[in-house]
Image (cartoon, grey):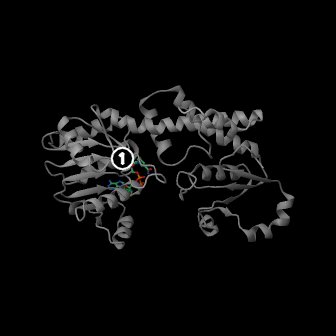
Amino acid sequence: MKICVVGLGNIGFNLFTYLGQKFSGEVIGVDVNESRVNELRREGHRVTSDYRALTGINVWLMAPSTGNQGQNIFSALEHMIICPGSLISIESTLPPGTMLRIREFLEKRGFKLGTDLFLIHVPHRVMFGVDKTVCDTPRVMGAFTKACLEMGRQFYTPLVPLLVEVSDVRVAELSKVVENVKRYVDVAFAQEIYGYCVAQGMNYDDLRMAVNSKNNVELLGTDWGIGGECLPKDMSFLRMVCYSALLEGAEQADQDYRDRIVKQVGAGKAVLVRGVSYKTGVKDLNHSRGVDLVRALEAAGNTVWVEDPLFSSDELSEAGFNSINVEVNQENEKENQLVDRVILDRQKAFDIK
Ligand SMILES: NC(=O)c1ccc[n+]([C@@H]2O[C@H](COP(=O)([O-])OP(=O)(O)OC[C@H]3O[C@@H](n4cnc5c(N)ncnc54)[C@H](O)[C@@H]3O)[C@@H](O)[C@H]2O)c1
């Protein structure tokens, strides 16, 4: 068997290494990012940026970043040399309706699904920081034909703890997006209730403890807002196809939440923001609401310092932040006594010290 993983980012590279252990010598990876490919090559991985080198592939596992309207998936499909009889599994998250467009794309190229080509959608749902491998979580699979489902079943059953098959491929597509949007709405709700508690002088942690004592309820904690790549992106995918006042409200609530933090701080202060990674425990500044908050506080006329246990002072400075460290504290001690100082903690954004 020759397996190719398309897209070697967070998901794709982890998938590539996981499969490499299961199918030794049979897995190759492709990515359009030349520097990423060169870096992986230097580490000894069998990867390429040249689709023309990928011949005789039996299984394509596609995990590129989705791109607006799924354009990265279509760009990859344009370049892939697809052999009759092969299996194509789309693992990236898709805007609802994309599988139908992929089917039309492949049929225009003369492939008949279920006989000479097998297409399935098995969206990824790994929880980094929790799962040990990218295949630890039950997976949903959908396809257009029973024969496609059968091919998918043969490939994935030995790899994942549970394969949840759905007969309508649109359900598989929507399941991934809804999973993330559900979390988005839950976080937005938590932010609203936390804000209410602070306004009323009530302890939000106590409220959570009380509410969560019932086993079918989970009131979430709060952070700087709803960041990361997936939740806001998947919310936008769903909003493109499903009008909902609730979803619109959740997006607005998230923006209002950060606006309220900035308003509470005011202007002309020295502000220390504790924690800027996009998520507690994950060393990544991309799509971070902590970063958005720092920039909004600066725009409001504050001097902002940041600290984050995951980053060194140098790393934070390189990323364009005033990083707090011992020397700075001592040097600026006198100056700091003269200005209003404010400390913001990521889990208690409204409880200003
Ligand atoms: N990161 C997560 O936690 C997570 C979880 C579940 C689902 N997903 C989904 O998985 C997909 C990948 O996410 P990620 O976090 O790995 O993204 P990423 O940005 O880390 O990596 C994507 C990679 O795809 C490559 N790429 C883009 N277009 C390509 C093309 N035409 N051919 C080959 N390579 C191409 C990029 O160069 C990049 O290296 C997305 O659809 C995402 O929504 C991500």
Count up the numbered dots. Answer: 1
Of residues 272 and 157, the one drawn nearer to the viewer in this rendering: 157
Residue 353, percent from left and from top: 78, 50
Q: Quadrant of residue 176?
A: top left
Q: Residue at x 67, y 55 (%)?
A: 274
**Would you place residue 28 above or below residue 294 in this image?**
below
Does the Cβ of the disc 1 residue fall within 8 Å of ligand 1?
Answer: yes
Q: Residue at x 74, y 69 (%)?
A: 326
Residue marked by disc 1: 92
Regarding residue 166, the answer to whether it shows in the image is yes
Q: Quadrant of residue 255?
A: top right
Regarding residue 31, the answer to whether it shows in the image is no
Q: Is residue 162 left or right of residue 117?
A: right
Residue 250, percent from left and from top: 56, 33
How crowded pointer 1 is (Cα within 10 Å; few <14, some 14-19, many 20+) is rated as: many
Q: Is residue 281 left or right of residue 304?
A: left
Q: Is residue 340 left or right of residue 62?
A: right
Kind of residue at disc 1: Ser
Q: Quadrant of the N terminus?
A: bottom left
Q: Quadrant of residue 105?
A: top left
Residue 186, percent from left and from top: 55, 35
**Would you place residue 274 above or below residue 137 in this image?**
below
Residue 244, percent from left and from top: 49, 27
**Would you place residue 311 above or below residue 115 in this image?**
below
Q: Residue at x 79, y 52 (%)?
A: 268
Quick one: SS at disc 1? loop
